Image: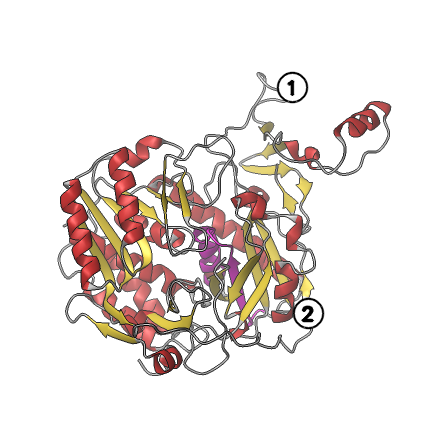
Amino acid sequence: MSGWNGTWVAGRLGVELEDAPGRAPLALADLVGLALRVNPKRPHLLVSTVLAKHVPTDPRLVRAAGHLLGLRVAEHLGRLAEGATADAAARLRTALGGVVERTGAADLDDLDDLTAATQGALAAVDGGDGLVLGYAETATALGHLVARALRLPSVHSTRRAVPGVASVLGFEESHSHATTHLVLAEDPALLAAPGPAVLVDDELSTGRTALATIRALHAHAPRAEYVVAALVDARREADRRHIAQVAAELGTRISVVALAEGEVRVPEGVVAPDPEPPVAGHDRAAGALVPGTDPGDAWPVGVRESGRHGFAPAHEAPMDAAAAAVAARVAERLEVAGVDAAGDVLVLGTEELMYAPLAVAEALRRGGRATYFSTTTRSPVQVRDVDGYAVRSGVRFLAHDRDADGYGAADRFAYNVAARDWAAIVVVLDRPTATAALAAPGGMLAALAPYAPHVLPVVLPVDPPGAQPLRGPGFGSYAPDEVAWLLQDLSHVRLEGDREERERRIQSGRRTTRSRCRRSTGRTRRTGSSTTSRSSRSPTGSRRPS
């Protein structure tokens, strides 16, 4: 591919991409560029051009690539006529050929054509039994897209421990910055469902993480077949033999399906060059922080925003509708703020939260906004503003989710944000990560402000698994169709003030200092068919449901 963004690393480290002819519809260079890690375990990083983790990408390209991977799995499982994905794969390659370096932009006609091709192929998929498991943090949305293509339930691993929810199983990812994965399926029976288990990741380099997952799944509920699906399969021959050995040991079948296959050849003993000084900041003055958007009744209680606790095909339509409603509300807010209607908008998801922000980005683009999608990450990557390098800019900020995920890493990152002059950046978070650190000095919102004249945080509600609103007459005096009460146990949260002093002030009628315990209850009022939330404000200025 002309203008490939892996030439810099290839030239200096001697890294080579060697395709496996005839085994996959695309070439490795079609789907990845190269950058350098800040990680001594592996010097190079494959940077996907369709995943939207490190590169702002047209959301149609992200969805089409995920669906195409799902179609490849459907073919492998005999749920789609052989060769049915060939047209979509050819159109994906055409669209990728139009990708502009550093932006992830492709020709609009190519992407519309690609969308039509993948949608047509999806209609031919036969349903069946099975389960899809995506990997945090990078492949959570990709797992969703594969599951949607296959019409199967899904769950994704997580690094976030949720109070009151036990992990059904766990496994380790040895080369990651946060190695422990939890699986917090609301219904443990999901992991014992009949049919094949499809494990979805962006890249398969050795297969060790997939094998650790398969061993854990097989110990929990043995099954006859596992399929590992990845955008890129870059295993060496020894790794391929090892997977076959584990399959024989467990008495099961393990297959691998990918959009591109081959090997990444790295010279023995190669060491990444030392990181360069940080790239100079954006030369534009910091933009304005647009007051956060409260999804309110746009994202109703009970609509799932991710697959952390399981996601069934029946959850898709409500989530699509909620994402479209949130996008409409965001568009209104951007219009009120005076954001140029013809300007480019970046929707930035946050770590594991990828699928809902992707849907919001797609809805904004359908509404006429030129919208791109990317997500933040915990992984440090060397940034070099040189031609032929896949990560040309980076934004570093203090972690705002440390209490939510339990990991102590102090920094988070967003890459290639300087790829365009954004008219606005829309940051989509879930409630547990919408902390005061967002708006603090060195926080994400301040770090993004120089890259767009408007930065808009959007906080999606998150309800614990199985949480149901309490209604009268069994709870409260309101009629059942008037008010729904949502209660959250915050006994584990350290309050901002002394508990006894607050109680004395409350009893005496004196004013108390603002405390987190004000958010211990929430109330939703139902008017007609809509639902709104009574809640306190988050540090970003957005309404934060309890």
Viewed as shown, does residue 472 lie left or right of 308? right
Is residue 472 positioned above or below 53 on the image?
above
Name the one closer to the observer, 460 or 432.
432
| Residue 220: quadrant of the picture | top left
Give the residue number, with chain letter if any, for mark 1. 477
Q: Secondary structure at mark 1?
A: loop
Q: Is residue 433 magenta?
A: no
Q: Answer few, some or many: residues within 10 Å of disc 2's Cα (few below 14, many 20 plus, some between 14 and 19).
A: some
Q: Amino acid at mark 2?
A: Ala
Would residue 79 be visible to someone looking at this image? Answer: no
Q: Earlier in the sequence, mark 1 or mark 2?
A: 2
Which span of residues is magenta-colored?
Answer: 341-365
- Residue found 81% across the figure and 29% down from its top: 501
Place of residue 541 in the rendered image (x, y in percent of width and height, measured from the top left)? 69, 50
Of tags 1 and 2, the one toward the viewer is 2
Which residue is label 2 attached to? 286
